[in-house]
Amino acid sequence: MTDSEKVAKVIEALKAAEREPAQIALPILNGLVGLVQGDGEQPLEVEEARSSAFLAICEVGKALHRGQPADHLWASAIDATQRWMTLAE
C-alpha cells in the first residue's frame, strides 16, 4: 500500500470516527496505528508530517479515553493528516 493510500484511509477513518461516541471511535483510532507508523524510508519532510499526524491522532485518543472534550483535537488530527497527504503524493 502506498503512502497516499494509507493517508486516504486514515482521513476516511478519522472523519468516520469523529461522528461516533468514544466507545466506538477509540477502536477505530487504535486500528490506525499500523497505517500511521513510519518505516523511515520517506524524505524527512514526509516523516515529520506523518509523525505530526500520529501525535495528533494520539491526542484525540487520549482525550476520548479520559472522557475529555475532543472537538478541537479532531480538527487538528484531520488537518495534520491532510498535510501529510499533500507531502506523500
Image (tube, grey):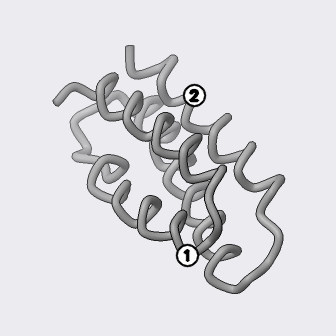
Q: Residue at x 56, y 53 (%)?
A: 17
Q: Amino acid at mark 2?
A: Gln
**Relative to the observer, which residue lies in front, 76 or 64?**
64
Between discs 2 and 1, the one toward the N terminus? 1
The quarter holding residue 16 reads top right
Q: Position of residue 80 (x, y in %)?
A: 62, 38
Classify the position of the C terminus by image quarter: top left
Q: Report the residue marked by disc 2.
A: 82
Which circle marks residue 63 in the picture? Answer: none
Observer-nearest of 31 and 54: 31
Give the CA separation, mark 2 to mark 1: 25 Å
Q: Is residue 76 left or right of residue 2?
A: right
Q: Looking at the picture, does residue 48 appear above or below residue 45?
A: below
Residue under label 1: 23
Q: Is residue 51 left or right of residue 83?
A: left
Asked if residue 1 lies left or right of residue 79, the reply is left
